Amino acid sequence: MSDRSFGSRLFDILNAAMLLIVAMITVIPFLFIVSGSLTPAEELLRKGVVLIPSELSLDAYRYIFSTDALVRSLLVTIYITAVGTLVNLFFTSLTAYGLARRDLYGRRALMLMIIFTMLFNGGIIPTFLVVKAFGLLDSYNSLIIPTAISAFNLIILKNFFQQLPDGLEEAAKIDGCNDFGILFRIVLPLSTPALATFALFYAVGHWNTFFSAILYINDSAKWPIQVLLRQVVIMSQGGIGDSTQFHEQFIAPPPQTVSMAVIVVSTLPILLVYPFLQKHFTKGLLLGSIKG
């Protein structure tokens, strides 16, 4: 017989029911998008909302892949995400390790300046002028360099580095390691859960790059997938869109179906990354949040 009380079992049941409802609220809209992208045009126009189509149609996907615009935007986004995440992890780790050293001169002043950036920023126009002054306009670097370090992630990673035993660093120095050797050969391998968590945060941020791309990228050939998705949505609403992005020999499906197909294509790759980081995500999420 279980030792758990009736109230404890009731709480578990209600908690599971609530989580199931929240999961359904989260999943059902995405299922609607996937089903809508695979629904024949006639059925979608007739029913409006379709969760289980009577038959599958790939017309929307054939249409959006009838040109290299979507593939090019996907490759651009993959490049920005991969390179940007590596840059983020490198500079965040390097800075966090330096700030975690208690013998760093001016450490407190540096931390105050970093915290200040979490509360205040220069704004859109000053940031644009800085990006322009450095000659980053219309280049992928404009989407990577200005966001090379997240102050919040930096502070969490610094706190995690401070929780590592001091004996590891002392032993490494006895073996002849310098500061870079300690960081890359000792500290970072022990920080895999934290780095995996921040890699996921940074990667999702780069994958969803939208506003910065609109501000800094004028060449449509360099648009990331989210900007192209915006263009498709504008076209579907009858706005001023660049319809030449898609091949005219294909009969265009309903704009709603095309929008859903692009959403699926732009969302699926980043969703596939999560299972590979899931085992580190739960453990790494709270690392550095408390003093060990």
Image (cartoon, helix red, strand yellow):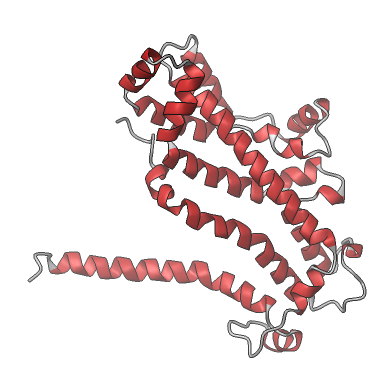
The quadrant of the image that shows the N terminus is bottom left
In the image, taking residue 242 as reference, residue 183 lies left or right, namely left
Q: Residue at x 38, y 38 (%)?
A: 287
187 relative to 266, above or below = above
Residue 225 visible somewhere in the drawing: yes
Q: Position of residue 40 (x, y in %)?
A: 72, 85
Determine the residue located farthest toward the top in the rendered image: 105
Q: Nearer the viewer, residue 276 or 52?
A: 276
User: Looking at the image, is 4 positioned above or below residue 55?
Assistant: above
- Quadrant of image for the C terminus: top left
Judge from the rendering whether residue 104 lies leftward or rightward of residue 130; answer left or right: left
Q: Quadrant of residue 147?
A: top right
Q: Is residue 115 visible?
A: no
State the image coordinates of residue 124 (x, y, percent, origin top left). 73, 36
In the picture, measured across the screen, residue 118 lies left or right of residue 142, that is left
- For image coordinates 74% across by 31% down, the residue present is 127
Q: Is 141 situated above or below 31?
A: above
Residue at (47%, 30%) from the top-left corner? 155
- Relative to the observer, which residue lies in front, 257 or 222? 222
Q: Nearer the viewer, residue 184 or 147?
A: 184
Give the farthest residue toward the front: 175
Q: Position of residue 186 (x, y in %)?
A: 42, 27
**In the displayed structure image, the side of residue 250 where residue 56 appears, left or right:** left
Residue 136 place in picture, x, y as percent: 80, 32
Q: Quadrant of residue 165?
A: top left
The residue under the point 46% across, 27% down is 185
